[in-house]
Image: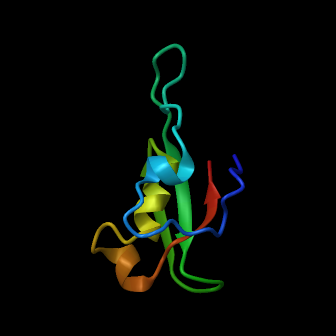
């Protein structure tokens, strides 16, 4: 699932939908919700963060823009290194 936007940062004040474009919901045709497990890192051989979400693009955007004042903001964790 490479959107070609790896490493790019959204402009301040820009919403995830405007930056990444409209996305399909994470719901399968038979009505099941899809969840993603993902790992973020601050940089090589440093802090890791493990998360679970049903909207990976939105969640990574929130980490990159420091939407919340939590662990990932405190330690500068915003590089997506793996998801499934």
Q: Residue at x 60, y 83 (%)?
A: 43
User: Relative to 34, is 42 above or below?
Assistant: below
Q: Residue at x 42, y 84 (%)?
A: 75
Q: Residue 29: give x, y in percent of width and height.
A: 54, 16
Nearest the eye: 4 or 41: 4
Total labels: the figure holds 0
Residue 9 visible (yes or no):
yes
Q: Residue 27: give x, y in percent of width and height.
A: 48, 26
**Horizontally, is 12 left or right of 20 in the view?**
left
Give the image quarter of residue 70: bottom left
Nearest the eye: 66 or 47: 66
Q: Residue at x 44, y 41 (%)?
A: 54
Single out the residue that lies furthest toward the left: 69
Q: Residue 20: give x, y in percent of width and height.
A: 55, 50
User: Relative to 57, is 45 above or below?
Assistant: below
User: Relative to 5, is 45 above or below?
Assistant: below
Q: Residue at x 48, y 68 (%)?
A: 11
Q: Residue 69: give x, y in percent of width and height.
A: 27, 74
Residue 51 visible (yes or no):
no
């Amino acid at each position: 699932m490479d959107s070609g936007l790896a490493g790019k940062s959204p402009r301040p004040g820009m919403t995830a939908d405007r930056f990444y474009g409209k996305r399909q919901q994470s719901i399968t045709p038979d009505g099941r919700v899809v969840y993603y497990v993902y790992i973020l890192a601050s940089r090589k051989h440093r802090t890791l963060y493990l998360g679970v979400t049903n909207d990976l693009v939105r969640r990574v955007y929130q980490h990159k823009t420091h939407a919340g004042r939590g662990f990932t903001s405190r330690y500068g964790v915003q590089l997506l290194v793996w998801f499934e």
